């Protein structure tokens, strides 16, 4: 029986059913040994190129910065962040994503200020240390330079308006992301995302200027390159041929009406899996979810992109969040073209509850955390199984 069917049949799969032969604690490495032996993952050609190159599927958690200058000393690289990393290891994660932000004033795209809460030189050193701390714990790292729009609008709608405006925007954004590519290369980051939800750029005739930036990044950063496209425009994103891995911020709706049953949500998850399969086959590249997540409220899988800060008088519903996670994840774990996901998100200070409301995205300490843990401990079709003595293409009878 597949993990998808088992996960669909039970609310939380007992850990003992899917112990991965070492569990989370055994992935912690000695700091000096990790630094001396660290190698980036590589890929083989084709939609299953991740696992065929000997890589296990990504079991990832995004760790967000502390987005408040009044909370010094608890961001990336701090002792508080170390506690979050330790929690990620105990949860069974094998990867973390780190998301340093740059500031954009509004959608006119006049340029990127690389400072966010702390001056850029200080933030760069903090992020470097954060990456080293993750590697020391045996965690791989995806670095995701992100944009914060001060006007509160969505970065996907940035439009400088004129040819000259777009040229200036591309120059400024290119400088921003190249700076982080230098950090990624210096710290042996395991994957770099070149951008996040830049729909007005990468799905339009303006895309060639973004392709130029991607090629500049390749001259700096030598590891796998992805881009975090939005779930509803990735099929129209014209830069995918330049990437090693197709990345998706996967806030897919799983149903179209409130009160949907779990069976309905699971059918929605299967439709998502089918889209992943088609995209991987079209571009002959593996697909990963650079972000997944659902808020802790009733019916979170109907409009999962709705931001919790804009909600009022919300009833907290842990079961609804957990079922949405379960319905999305279960069908994907039997798909060999799918190379994993990053949960959105924990924070650099695990004890800081000021970053989002109780009904927010974080699964920490909620029923969704149990679903996530069980998925992390399972064998996936996207795993190479190299740790367990099988050839990369082998399958385990009775599981897949």
Image (cartoon, helix red, strand yellow):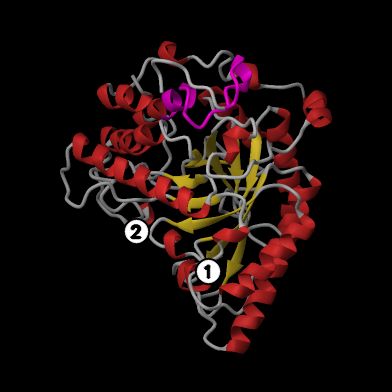
Tell me the quarter of the picture where residue 234 sits: bottom left
Relative to 260, say whether 377 is above or below. above
Residue 51 at what x, y percent from top left? 58, 33
- Segment tinted magenta in the rendering: 372-392
Magenta stretch contains residue 191: no
Is residue 212 or residue 290 the one in the foreground? 212
Q: Nearer the viewer, mark 2 or mark 1?
A: 1
Is residue 72 or residue 42 the one in the foreground? 42
Relative to 150, say whether 94 is above or below. above
Residue 237 at what x, y percent from top left? 49, 64
* Direction from residue 283 to residue 190 in the image, left or right: right
Relative to 190, say whether 220 is above or below. below
Magenta stretch contains residue 381: yes
Secondary structure under tag 1 reads helix
Residue 342 at what x, y percent from top left? 51, 41
Q: Residue at x 60, y 81 (%)?
A: 166
Q: Residue at x 64, y 60 (%)?
A: 116
Residue 140 at what x, y percent from top left? 65, 35
Q: Say if mark 2 contacts mark 1, CB within 8 Å.
A: no
Which circle marks residue 255 in the picture?
none
Q: Which residue is mark 2?
A: 310
Which circle marks residue 202 in the picture?
1
Can see residue 195? no
Local crowd size for mark 1, using a 10 Å CA cut-off: few (<14), some (14–19), many (≥20):
many
Give the distance between the C-alpha atoms of the residues marked 2 and 1, in whole angstroms: 28 Å
Is residue 345 or residue 45 the one in the foreground? 45
Q: Quadrant of the C terminus?
A: top left
Q: Residue at x 81, y 31 (%)?
A: 35
**First reached walking from the N terminus: tag 2 or tag 1:** 1
Secondary structure under tag 2 reads helix
Relative to 161, say whether 376 is above or below. above
Can see residue 9? yes
């Amino acid at each position: 029986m597949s993990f998808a069917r088992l996960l669909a049949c039970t609310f939380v799969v007992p850990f003992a059913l899917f112990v991965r032969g070492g569990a989370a604690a055994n992935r912690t490495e000695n700091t000096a040994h990790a630094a001396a032996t660290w190698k980036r993952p590589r890929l083989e050609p084709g939609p299953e190129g991740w696992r065929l190159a000997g890589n296990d599927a990504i079991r990832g958690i995004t760790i967000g910065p502390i987005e408040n200058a009044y909370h010094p000393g608890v961001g990336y690289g701090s002792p508080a962040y170390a506690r979050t990393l330790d929690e990620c290891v105990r949860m069974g994660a094998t990867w973390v994503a780190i998301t340093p932000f740059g500031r954009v004033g509004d959608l006119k795209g006049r340029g990127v200020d690389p400072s966010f809460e702390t001056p850029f030189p200080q933030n760069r050193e903090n992020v470097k240390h954060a990456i080293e701390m993750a590697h020391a714990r045996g965690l791989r790292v995806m670095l995701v330079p992100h944009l914060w729009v001060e006007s509160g609008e969505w970065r996907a709608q940035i439009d400088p308006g004129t040819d000259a405006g777009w040229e200036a925007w591309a120059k400024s954004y290119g400088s921003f992301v190249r700076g982080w590519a230098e950090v990624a290369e210096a710290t042996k980051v395991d994957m770099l995302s070149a951008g996040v939800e830049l729909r007005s750029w990468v799905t339009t005739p303006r895309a060639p200027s973004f392709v130029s930036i991607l090629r500049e990044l390749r001259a700096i950063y030598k590891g796998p390159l992805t881009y975090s496209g939005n779930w509803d425009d990735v099929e129209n994103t014209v830069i995918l041929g330049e990437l090693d891995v197709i990345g998706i911020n996967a806030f897919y709706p799983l149903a179209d009406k409130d009160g949907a049953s779990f069976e309905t949500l699971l059918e929605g998850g299967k439709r998502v899996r089918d889209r992943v399969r088609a995209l991987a086959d079209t571009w002959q590249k593996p697909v990963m979810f650079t972000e997944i997540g659902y808020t802790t409220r009733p019916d979170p899988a109907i409009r999962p992109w709705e931001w919790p800060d804009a909600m009022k008088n919300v009833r907290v519903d842990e079961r609804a969040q957990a079922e949405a996670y379960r319905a999305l994840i279960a069908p994907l774990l039997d798909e060999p073209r799918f190379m994993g996901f990053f949960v959105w998100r924990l924070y650099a200070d695990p004890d800081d509850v000021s970053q989002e409301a109780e009904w927010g995205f974080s699964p920490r300490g909620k029923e969704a955390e149990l679903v996530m843990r069980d998925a992390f401990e399972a064998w996936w079709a996207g795993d190479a199984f190299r740790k367990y003595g099988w050839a990369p293409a082998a399958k385990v009878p009775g599981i897949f």
